[in-house]
Amino acid sequence: MRNLYKETTSRKKRDTVFLIVVLVFFVKGTSLLLSSHFEMGNVLKEQINVVRNLRVDVLREIPHDRSAFTQGLLWADGHLYESTGRYGESTLRRLDPETGFIQERTNIPTNFFGEGLAKVGQNLILLTWKAERAILYDVNSLKALRTFRYDGEGWGLCYDGARLIMSNGSDTLTFRDPTSFQEIGSVQVTLRGMPRDNINELECVDGAVYANLWDDDYILRIDPDTGSVTHQIDSHGLLSREESRGTDVLNGIAYNPQADTFYITGKWWPKMFEVRFIE
Ligand SMILES: [Ca+2]
């Protein structure tokens, strides 16, 4: 009986020690798993928030009409198309990208303040600031064909080959059907996890959206699927102090896929710049 009691007691002790060891391993393992999960989460978060800084490499300067209050700029088939704003002064133009010469120009009705511009097929779509109307033009004749209605302000517009992407001065990019102009989605633009508003003129390039900001000489490269800013391009100092007199903000960004270059300018700027964005 005594031996049996001893054996039972020692088995109980063994079981208790085993249980403690199992518990220690379980608690340790769980905490390790949790901490590695949180670490992975932080790494992913940091990767999303990484913003690369680029600068502007000027390849060429091109004369720009100082009376052009530039709102939209795009390159297509060897031409630049530019829309300009202000009531009674708004225009749509076709320019020679080599010389800046205005080849064709059409006035926008005086009740409209011209804004962003995109090309879809053989048409141009021009936004207006507060009239809640977009105007469809024939790209060759620059004749107005019809209008679309939308809600709110119109600022920037670009076409990525499948959908129109539009800004309205807030931190929201709105996606629209290129045929009906109906809203089909939206995304919030964030810079290092924080909302970034004042998104202005846009350019769709290889699945990304380039946007210049209102009242800030930075151009952002945005991933339209997440809204995250991936690159920030410092565009300060393009004009000399003398050239800057009487000008307004940087506005107007176009991409030429044949040369892999961008054209940038601003409201009432005396120059356009053909550039590349480099580290
Ligand atoms: Ca553009």
Image (spheres, helix red, strand yellow):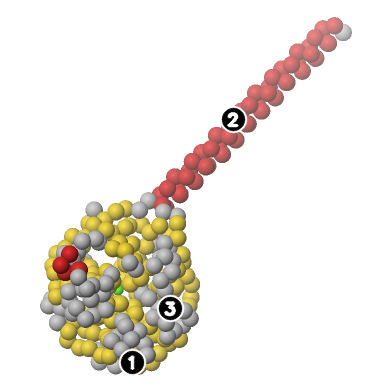
Asked if residue 197 is positioned above or below residue 97 in the image, the reply reads above
Image point (37%, 62%), residue name = 222
Using the numbered discs, state the Cα–Cα distance from disc 2 to disc 3 in whole angstroms. Answer: 56 Å
Numbered tag placed on residue 109 in the rendering = 1
Front residue (pair 173, 216)? 216
- Secondary structure under badge 3? loop
Callout 3 amino acid: Glu
Give the image quarter of residue 201. bottom left
Callout 2 amino acid: Lys
Residue 179 seen in the current view: no
In the picture, the quarter occupied by the N terminus is top right
Q: Which tag is nearer the camera, tag 1 or tag 2?
A: 1
Name the residue tied to disc 2: 28
Image point (22%, 73%), residue name = 246
Outermost residue, right side = 1
Front residue (pair 138, 154)? 154
> Around disc 1, counting alpha carbons within 10 Å, would you say few (fewer than 14), some (14 to 19), or many (20 or more)?
few
Left or right, residue 96 beside residue 180: left
Residue 179 x, y percent position in the rendering: 41, 84
Q: Earlier in the sequence, mark 1 or mark 2?
A: 2
Numbered tag placed on residue 100 in the rendering = none
Q: Looking at the image, do the residues carrying marks 1 and 2 touch, with CB atoms under 8 Å apart?
A: no
Asked if residue 91 is positioned above or below residue 162 in the image, the reply reads below
Left or right, residue 247 beside residue 167: left
Callout 1 amino acid: Pro
Name the residue tied to disc 3: 153
> Around disc 2, counting alpha carbons within 10 Å, would you say few (fewer than 14), some (14 to 19), or many (20 or more)?
few
Image point (28%, 70%), residue name = 249
Residue 233 x, y percent position in the rendering: 28, 59
Q: Looking at the image, do the residues carrying marks 1 and 3 touch, with CB atoms under 8 Å apart?
A: no
Residue 184 x, y percent position in the rendering: 48, 75
- Secondary structure under badge 2? helix
